[in-house]
Image: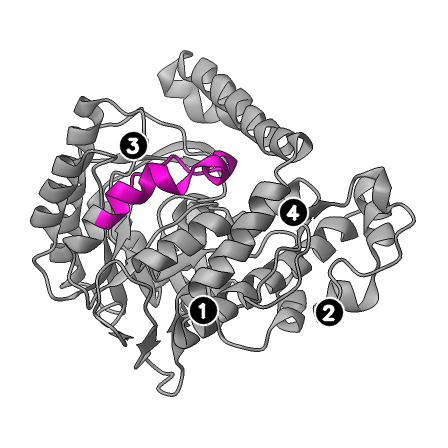
Amino acid sequence: MKFIVESLTKNAPRLGALREIENRPNLVLETPMAMLYTRGGSIPHITNEVFKLLTQKSQIIQIPLVSTYNFEDVMSVYKGTIAEFVGMKECISCLTVQDPGDHTLPGYHVENSIPLWTRHGKVLISAKSYMNLVSLFKPDMYYLLSDGDTNISSPAKRIRKSVQNTIKYHKQCIDTHENLTGVKNSFMMGAIAGGYDLKARKECIDGICQNDSIGGYLIDGLHNNGPEVELLAADEINPVVVFVINNLQPTKLRAIHGCWNPVVILKLVQLGVDLFDTSYCYIVTERSCALTFTIDANGNDEKFELNLRQADFAEDFGPILPGCTCLACSKYSRAYIHYLVNVQELLGPVLLTIHNVHHYMRFFESIRQCIGNGTLSLLEEKVGNQFHSSKHVDQQDNVLASCERVDSADAFASAVLEMDRDNITASVSS
């Protein structure tokens, strides 16, 4: 697999493509694009059969190790790839370490390992054990192990340690990769750690950007994942992203993960970021909302998103978004989905996921078109106006409520960790 970029201009939007994919010589994946966010190898709320109704095009599926770690035993005897195992063999698989849609607990590091918070408790992952999982999963793409446990408030000591760990894990993974069978042709991506400290970022870049076999880089360590990422402003991360991009080879793929809102996504695309994920669709669905922001630079102004749990939609028999061709908009009304989410029917989040993912995929199609015809700034302006004009208190409360639930989970986990360390897994599981 190779990444080909049309323009090598720094800090500018660019079109590119992933080509020469093993066993799929005719497949071309255009960038900027968003990988499909999965949990346990499945898109939340929808089955693979429903996914095929969503799109017939090949996509990249994001496989977070934190939600698939328990596949290790079965994958050790399974002869196929992780994409085949989860029933999505028509897709390109990309193995990541953390789950961008779920808050990653900070701290609890052990020398030569990072903590992975699985559903069964904390698991320590070293470079050796990580690469063993890579060899079992056989992904088409994967990120090398890194220590991205930093955010805007991280102290200098934690930032320095994250850089040292990331450089060390990177070199260990590279050495192991050369001796593995089955993943020699996988597209490897490194990670740039260093939090919001530009000197630390430069140290990390100098320490890992010396191997031509690396196809791209993840700008890591900007946040601890989860719904609170939606609240991060572009101005906060802009200096770091600009600095990192200026110090990377322009021919390499650039990725950023997280539940970024579309306004920030457009800012990052303007800076030259190529690869994102759809975890934002997941958190929007979880608060019973539907994305309705414009995806056309010349389109009509709609509300940024609709909270279909609100009573205003109880007798609204129109589609979620007029003109949308997704299954949810073609066959169901706002009133029906309002009823489903209020009585907690399983079909409610299914229909919202179908619409939100479909809308988000069309959003990235529009981004590529706008880059091609020079109208990306106009699209950015329209989406930004919608976002800021619809930023009501009830919408912010929905986001903050999601963050509060995460904080409660953190408090519970911290309390458990104060218990007998030898019984931590059993305690969390119970």
Identify the image quadrant of the C terminus: top right
In the rendered structure, which amino acid carries the disc numbered 3? Thr
Circle 3 SS class: loop
- Residue at x 23%, y 22% (from the top left corner): 155
The label on residue 375 is 1
Q: Return the disc, 1 or 2, that comes first in the chain's sequence.
A: 2
Q: Which residue is mark 3?
A: 150
Residue furthest to the bottom: 26
Residue 114 locus on image (x, y percent): 27, 35
Q: Is residue 110 left or right of residue 418?
A: left
Residue 411 locus on image (x, y percent): 49, 17
Q: Which residue is mark 4?
A: 285
**Contact? badges 4 and 1 (CB < 8 Å):** no
Label 1 – label 2 distance at C-alpha: 22 Å
Q: Return the disc, 1 or 3, that comes first in the chain's sequence.
A: 3
Residue 27 locus on image (x, y percent): 40, 82
Magenta stretch: give its range. Answer: 221-242
In the rendered structure, which amino acid carries the disc numbered 4? Thr
Q: Which residue is mark 2?
A: 323
Q: Nearer the viewer, residue 196 or 18?
A: 196
- Residue at x 64%, y 42% (from the top left corner): 390
Label 1 – label 3 distance at C-alpha: 35 Å
Vertical arrangement, residue 222 with respect to residue 73, above or below: above
Q: Nearer the viewer, residue 396 or 303?
A: 303
Give the label, 1 or 2, closer to the camera.
1
Q: Return the disc, 4 or 2, that comes first in the chain's sequence.
A: 4
